Image (cartoon, helix red, strand yellow):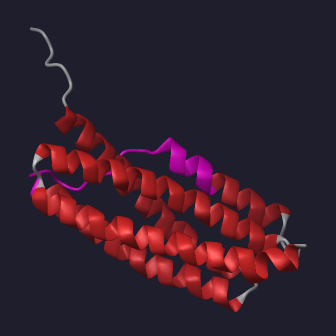
Amino acid sequence: MATQPKTLDDLFLDTLKDIYYAEKQILKTLPKMAKAASSPELKKAFETHRDETETHVERLSEVFDVIGKAPRGKTCDAILGIIEEGKSIMEEFEGSPALDAGLVAAAQAVEHYEMARYGTLKAWAQQLGHKDAVKLLDQTLSEEKKTDQLLSQLGTGEANKQAA
């Protein structure tokens, strides 16, 4: 019996599982980043993003629902690598004036990964006719972009000046 060729539906589900796993890993990491940050603004940004990430996980559960699948994660090596990089920065730059700048950079690597994933998922959901999924994914994509802009402001402001 020949196996069916993989479809865009399969790819969509696979990528959805990937970002679901990634968001759950990010949830575990953000409190550590908040604790490591020395700037009160940066601490607050990480705490706010943690709350937002909980909403993103709930929204992803709704997307799974829309396509009639149970919410399940699939190990995402990319996010594990990005998080590992962030942990190295926290260890190597602990107590240093460059720590916050490093944390901002690590957080932006996470944001850019998420933005890439959500952008792709939104486009595929449109192509597959999952209108409700498009709306949910677009909401999250907008929030990820806002967080990225906030991190840019924090980075180009206080964090990078302190590091220099």
Query: Is residue 104 toward the left or the right of residue 118 in the image?
Result: right
Q: Can residue 45 be spotted in the picture? A: yes
Q: Residue 114's x, y, as percent?
A: 45, 57
Which residue appears at 17% of the width and 38% of the height?
Answer: 9
Asked where in the image residue 8 lies, by quadrant, the reply is top left
Q: Residue 4's x, y, as percent?
A: 13, 19
As displayed, is residue 47 above or below residue 26?
Answer: below
Give the residues drawn in magenta, as a range. 66-83
Q: Residue 96's x, y, as percent?
A: 88, 74
As displayed, is residue 149 above or below residue 76?
Answer: below
Asked where in the image residue 10 lies, by quadrant, the reply is top left
Which residue appears at 53% of the width and 83% of the height?
Answer: 47
Residue 51 part of the magenta-drawn span: no
Which residue appears at 61% of the width and 74% of the height?
Answer: 151
Q: Residue 14's x, y, as percent?
A: 29, 41
Residue 75 part of the magenta-drawn span: yes
Quarter of the C terminus within the rendering: bottom right
Quarter of the N terminus within the rendering: top left
As displayed, is residue 64 above or below residue 62?
Answer: above
Asked where in the image residue 106 lies, by quadrant, the reply is bottom right
As displayed, is residue 33 above or below residue 83?
Answer: below
Between 95 and 112, the one lying in front of the other is 112
